[in-house]
Amino acid sequence: MKAVKVKPNQTVFDILVEQYGTCEALAEFLGNNPELENTPDAGMAEENSVSGRLMPEAMRVFRLDLPVRLGSTVWIDTDSKLIKTSVIKEIDTEVTTYMD
């Protein structure tokens, strides 16, 4: 296993592509990282909250398509049979697809 720091605006899908070369490793990745959180201010605010305050969507439920909390450490199984080394070798830039 190796520890990887989450980069700005990286979603789970971005991390999977960058580290595994495929999104097929989703179940394995989530199993190795059960405490994932989204960036606190990511997503749309809830307009009809019980308290009357707006609450960012990321604070209500973890979403795969929203950025993972910046600076978080995620664990990658370096022995995984799901890693596509030929794909990873071709990636020469950071993978971040989320746009504010």
Image (cartoon, grey):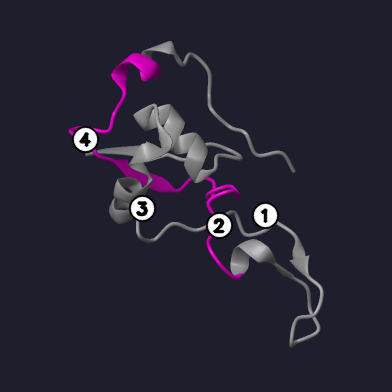
**Any magenta on residue 72?**
yes
Q: Earlier in the sequence, mark 2 or mark 4?
A: 2
Residue beneath disc 1: 42
Question: Circle 2 sits in a helix, a strand or a loop, which is it?
Answer: loop
Instruction: Indicate whether 45 appears above or below 74.
Output: below
Say which quarter of the image contains residue 97.
top right
Q: CA distance from mark 4 to mark 1?
A: 30 Å
User: Within 10 Å of the Cα at label 3, are there few (<14), some (14-19), or many (20+) other Cα atoms?
Assistant: some
Question: Which sits in the foreground, 9 or 5?
Answer: 9
Three-letter residue code for mark 4:
Ser
Q: Position of residue 24 (x, y in %)?
A: 37, 38
Q: Earlier in the sequence, mark 2 or mark 3?
A: 3
Three-letter residue code for mark 3:
Leu
Residue 63 — which label?
Answer: 2
Which part of the image, by quadrant, shows the N terminus? Answer: top left
Residue drawn at x 37%, y 13% as measured from the top left: 89
Three-letter residue code for mark 1:
Ala
User: Within 10 Å of the Cα at label 2, are there few (<14), some (14-19), or many (20+) other Cα atoms?
Assistant: some
Q: Horizontal placement of 47 versus 95: left or right?
A: right
Q: Position of residue 75 (x, y in %)?
A: 31, 44
Q: CA distance from mark 4 to mark 3?
A: 13 Å
Name the main secondary structure of what is drawn in magenta. loop
Q: Nearer the viewer, mark 4 or mark 1?
A: 4
Question: Circle 3 sits in a helix, a strand or a loop, which is it?
Answer: helix
Q: Earlier in the sequence, mark 2 or mark 1?
A: 1
